[in-house]
Image: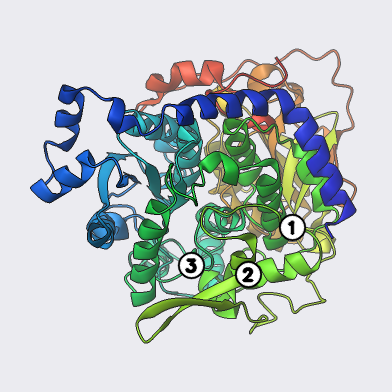
Amino acid sequence: MVHSNVEAVTKELRQRSESARTAFLRQTQRQADMGKTRASLSCGNIAHAVAASCQQDKQHMLDMTTANVAIISAYNDMLSAHAPYADYPDQIKAALQPLGHTAQVAGCVPAMCDGVTQGQPGMEMSLFSRDVIAQATAISLSHNVYDATLLLGVCDKIAPGQLMGALAYAHLPTLFVPSGPMSTGTTNEEKVAVRQAYAAGDVGKEALFAMECQAYHSPGTCTFYGTANTNQLVLEAMGLILPGAAFVAPNSALRHALTCYAATALASQCAGSATYRPLCDVVTEKSVINGVVALLASGGSTNHTIHLVAMARAAGIILTWEDIDTLSHVVPLLTRMYPNGPADINAFEAAGGVPTLMVHLHALGLLHDDTLPAVGQFSDQLTTPRLDQGQLVWEPAAPSTDTGVIAASGSHFSSTSGLRMLSGNMGNAVIKVSAVAPAHRVVCAPARVFDCQHQVEQAYQGGEFNQDVVVVVRFNGPAANGMPELHKLMPILGNVQKMGYQVALVTDGRLSGASGKVPAALHVCPEAMHGGALAVIKDGDLITLDANAGVLTCHADLSLRPVTEPPQATNTWGRDLFAAARQQVSRADEGATYLFPSPRA
């Protein structure tokens, strides 16, 4: 039986979404009614589509009884998580060929690395890249010669963008194919210690560089539980990745078998088959709720309070922060991965991975088990893949083999989840509390107000943080500068906390999924650029951030203060190309997207 709170939130979500969801499904049905679109192309159209294919593939693509699978790839050889995708198209084509099916790289989407752009001008384009990726995915599918879609993408904005774009073609069966995490290079304790020591001036750049190169050292996703790995966990929980496939190592025999199986299984589920399963049947109100529950139980990235809202909106589902907050009070924290604990994603996988977590959540009645994954049934999501004499098999997920990483059945690390919502006269915000010690979850201190993270760094280096402080960084919302991540602040504020002072961050910007032990009120809405309270806060204003009570309050009278003018941009580095996006983008609690009208309109 499903938990009453989960059932109630799902019911409200369905009612709120009725109009938008009906319109989405109606449009999807019109696409499905067109039948196999290759059959409706002109001779010239189809000749262009098959011109580059070998003779055998041409024959198969002209045979309307076979499937032609679109590959949407985020491959580039700079981004470690996507470098393994170089060989995937050949693997997929080789798996399909004996069955008479074909695959084509329908298009490639941009894939920027937030790890490279942290603290750099390019970060101002990071969030908008998600919507660009959605558009690029839709453009790639626009040739209408495909019967199914395989999405090759993992990292921060890339996988959400691909799903948003694929939902414009939700009549096609669709599945994500992961690449997997790199091996563990160093401990997370060592990373934090060296970064804080460097920020304090206790070690030089050479020591910092050596540590970073040890941490990020090979193809695969980063190993901490940030936004990229949260993507994979949430998408698997939603049924958009094969069971147990999210965190299998790159270039392993099991990873290769899973990639081939994803291709052949999806090709067998195209329109006209008895097992036809379009994407619109997979991404539903209930599967979205399953994704939210998995996010909360795992203490995942705060970025997904934005991405899940936007992904759901692409399917005509109006998810809100209030939905997430309501669930956060009944979903326990069941995993401990950095920054919520010392372990990394490889330790999580070794402890049982997503299937073991799903079994635990299902036993608690926190998952809808009448959803349809992209392949198989919900019960399959509670199984783990392995190779048996070279053959891919799934077996029931085992209990956690490391109860310090995935809680044992009947236990948890916290009775409530790792994410909370804050509200008060400063607006609404998101906070990740799973990595914040209970002693630091309530901060009441004077404000220091800044317009960018570089000003905070200068103030710290000038010795200005020698007292309790709430650091306010404003004009970093979507409409101001694209809502960059402010990860440079974490070592600095961590050192202030280490000195014994109360410290917190309040911002309309974002933090990396690796945000940790300093309480941070993020994504403040409305943002300063739109006249939110952050635009009138002054140095010295007393601010209370209470993560336990869900409160974010300034104790000054803000009603008559003039609104501060936003700072002028200096180095654009391509920023000017996104002026229209900044003008049209919705609020963070509406998904920070320029693709859909605001549900408040």
- Between 313 and 60, the one nearer to me in the picture: 60
Q: Secondary structure at mark 2?
A: helix
Residue drawn where x is 62% and y is 54% of the image: 515
- Between 150 and 546, the one nearer to me in the picture: 150
Lower position in the chain sequence, tag 1 or tag 2: 1
Lower position in the chain sequence, tag 3 or tag 1: 3
Residue drawn where x is 53% and y is 64% of the image: 224
Q: Quadrant of the C terminus?
A: top right
Lower position in the chain sequence, tag 3 or tag 2: 3
Q: Amino acid at mark 3?
A: Phe
Above-or-below relation of 457 to 403:
above
- Between 108 and 568, the one nearer to me in the picture: 108
Direction from residue 457 to residue 166 in the image, left or right: left
Q: Nearer the viewer, mark 3 or mark 1?
A: 1
Q: Residues within 10 Å of mark 3 (few under 14, many from 20)?
A: many
Report if residue 149 is visible in the image: yes
Q: Which residue is mark 3?
A: 247
Q: Amino acid at mark 1?
A: Leu
- Say how many tags the image has: 3
Q: Which mark is residue 367?
A: 1
Q: Which mark is residue 181?
A: none
Above-or-below relation of 235 to 210:
above
Rendered location of residue 498, percent (x, y): 70, 63
Q: Nearer the viewer, mark 3 or mark 2?
A: 2
Q: Secondary structure at mark 3?
A: loop
Rendered location of residue 382, percent (x, y): 63, 69
Q: Which residue is mark 2?
A: 382
